[in-house]
Image (cartoon, rainbow, N blue to C red):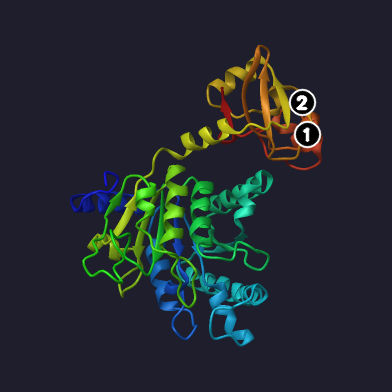
Amino acid sequence: MSDIGSNSTSQISVGWCRQAFESSAPLVVKIGSSLLIDAQGSARRDWMSRLAAQLACRPGPFILVSSGAIGLGRGAIGLRARPASLAEAQAAAAIGQICLAQLWSDVLGRQGLSCGQMLLTLGDLEDRGRYLNARNTLHTLLGHGIVPVINENDTVATGEIRFGDNDRLAARVAQLAGAELLVLLSDVDGLHDANPASNPQAQLIPEVERVTSEIESLADAASTTDFGTGGMISKLAAARIATAAGCHVLLTSGRGKDEPLERYLSTGRGTLFRATDKPLVTRKQWLRGLQHQAGVIHVDAGAVAALARGASLLAAGATRVEGSFERGALVAICGPDGPVGQGLCGYNAADARRLVGVKSDRIEQVLGYPGRGAMIHRDDLVLF
């Protein structure tokens, strides 16, 4: 398979990951339920403390995508095994989510860090308005030095409660944060060329250049643990999402007595999935492919020139707004000579009309609330 690196690439992968761990770029770490919860259904507090201590030492921010709410809460409703019904799973999640948030607050607090909880579903990141809200919240937390602790909102999810939710959610969060690396900490070493549980000759694959259908064929049908629902299929799905968005993905085991991330750095046992491009480039490609424009924002020549230099579209440069749309909708951007691009508007149509030609320092005066700065942020627009 041409997309699989040889064992000689392992040291290179480890070296790159070490640099990513020590960089100032955002790092996303997803923790599986099997690492957080022991056989009795109790949290592995010591393990969580070791991970928190290791992450607290890096210079850049980090985000935790943490499973475990259902596993921690099920005992309170008398369940010994994973809930069989959706209602029981949601009830267990409602109970366990409080426990999980408190645990992370405690272990991070010992490192002098504060955390904030974000409960999301994949649907929150598909809807453009909710996507913008989630992104703004995430970046505001990071900007204030707060550690976001993110989990699937199992209490309201329906079809989302199935294998792989938090793997795929972690990939979307990495995309949201513009992360350089997503670490999937699990109870497996990485991707093998065969199932190591049934084939003792199975070899660990240290690096994957692209997640192709051939790579996906190496995954067995979804495996589950007593507390978690993810298997290799969900992890490869997450790797495909994140790498396409420009984020490298490391799949490795968090087992052992060492610091969870140190095991990979010292042994090289893991699989690094290489990103296909830089996050912003990939996002621009996604924006360019959107087709259903809900409105048009006309801008002056000065705004066109500023956009060409990589600036955001400010309200001061807008001359007219057409259409009826909500915040986060896709709108066309037209200059004096015609269409110049498109993007996701930070205001609904009514507010956007009120802001036409308004300088940024007067937005609060015009709208009656502070607003969100740019009419279309540069990360949310693409030029033709």
Q: What x and y, as percent, mark residue 284?
A: 52, 33
Q: Amino acid at mark 1?
A: Ala
Which label is found at residue 89?
none
Which label is found at residue 349?
1
Q: Residue 319: name its quadrant.
A: top right
Q: What x and y, as percent, mark residue 355?
A: 77, 30
Specify whether 185 is left or right of 375: left
Q: Are marks 2 and 1 in contact (CB under 8 Å)?
A: yes
Q: On screen, 36 above or below 209?
A: below
| Residue at disc 1, secondary structure | helix
Q: What x and y, as percent, mark residue 239?
A: 42, 52
Which residue of the protein is positioned furthest toward the left in this rendering?
8
Specify whether 238 is left or right of 201: right
* Depth check, front residue: 25 or 348: 348
Mark yes or no: residue 39 visible.
yes
Which label is found at residue 321?
2
Residue at the image point whose x is 43% and y is 69% from the top: 223
